[in-house]
Image: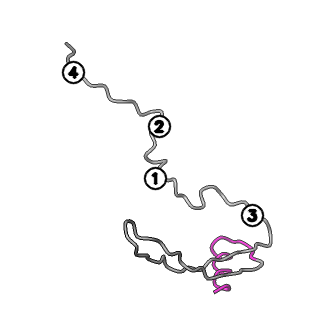
Amino acid sequence: MQIEIKRVLESLYGLQVAKVNTLNMEGKKKRVRGSVAYYRRPDYKKAYVTLKEPVTLPANLFPFNMAEEKNAPTSDDKPSERSGSSK
């Protein structure tokens, strides 16, 4: 698994990986609201990657805020005026 992580990082992102350490994380137990019952979140694997050279990642590597930027009003947007008779 560690070799696969190293190959993906080197091929997709062009990073120079020195070493990869992995560990298996056990899912947490969560209590069901209003009940005595519990459920477990799934187990997952975590990877710690050491790079040969320090790298600064671009801000848009994981563009989570793209939807917010699209919906944000711009300075060109003006509120529509209602055309009605005022009494």
Task: Mark 3: give few (<14), some (14-19) or many (20+) Cα within 10 Å.
Answer: few
In the image, taking residue 63 as reference, residue 56 lies left or right, namely right
Which residue is label 2 attached to?
A: 74
Task: Mark 1: give few (<14), some (14-19) or many (20+) Cα within 10 Å.
Answer: few
Which residue is label 1 attached to?
A: 67
Q: Is residue 16 magenta?
A: yes
* Helix, strand or loop at mark 3: loop
Image coordinates of residue 78 in percent, x first then y, are 39, 30
Query: What residue is drawn where x is 32% and y is 29%?
Result: 80
Inter-mark Cα distance, 3 to 1: 27 Å
In the image, taking residue 37 as reference, residue 11 lies left or right, namely right
Query: What residue is drawn where x is 49% and y is 47%?
Result: 69
Image coordinates of residue 26 in percent, x first then y, are 57, 80
Q: Quadrant of residue 85?
A: top left
Mark 4 near mark 2, Cβ–Cβ under 8 Å?
A: no
In the picture as drawn, the residue positioned furthest to the top comes out as: 87
Inter-mark Cα distance, 4 to 2: 27 Å
Inter-mark Cα distance, 4 to 1: 35 Å
Q: Upstream in the sequence, badge 3 or badge 1?
A: 3
Q: Which residues are magenta?
A: 1-17
